[in-house]
Amino acid sequence: MKAIQKLKLTNLPSLLKSSEAADLLRIDIQTLRRWAHKGRIPFYKIDVHRWRYKREDLLAILKQETV
């Protein structure tokens, strides 16, 4: 069984998987995808079923939400 590593701001990869991005933003993965489709969050399609989100984009969203 694969160990699950808890994401911290200090060890975030530059591109996050959908599940990691949703966890960081504390939203459901379906909400994340809906926001991406509406243009609220930039995303990058690796292939049909694999999306990635830039760490900097997500941190900027978090900063806007807390201001």
Image (tube, rainbow, N blue to C red):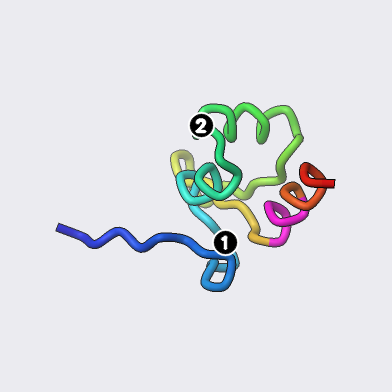
Q: Indicate the position of residue 46 as horizontal and vertical percent values.
A: 52, 52
Q: Is residue 38 left or right of residue 48?
A: right
Q: Indicate the position of residue 17 as horizontal and vertical percent values.
A: 49, 52
Residue located at (45% from left, 45% from top): 19
Q: Which residue is mark 1?
A: 15
| Residue farthest along the bottom direction in this orientation | 10
Confirm whether the magenta stretch covers residue 47.
no
The segment highlighted magenta reads: 56-60
**Secondary structure beneath label 1:** strand
Disc nearer the start of the sequence (1/2) = 1
Q: Which residue is mark 2?
A: 28
Residue located at (51% from left, 31% from top): 28
The CA span between labels 1 and 2 is 18 Å
Q: Quadrant of residue 42?
A: top right
Asked whether the beta carbons under mark 1 and mark 2 sit within 8 Å of each other, the answer is: no
**Secondary structure beneath label 2:** loop
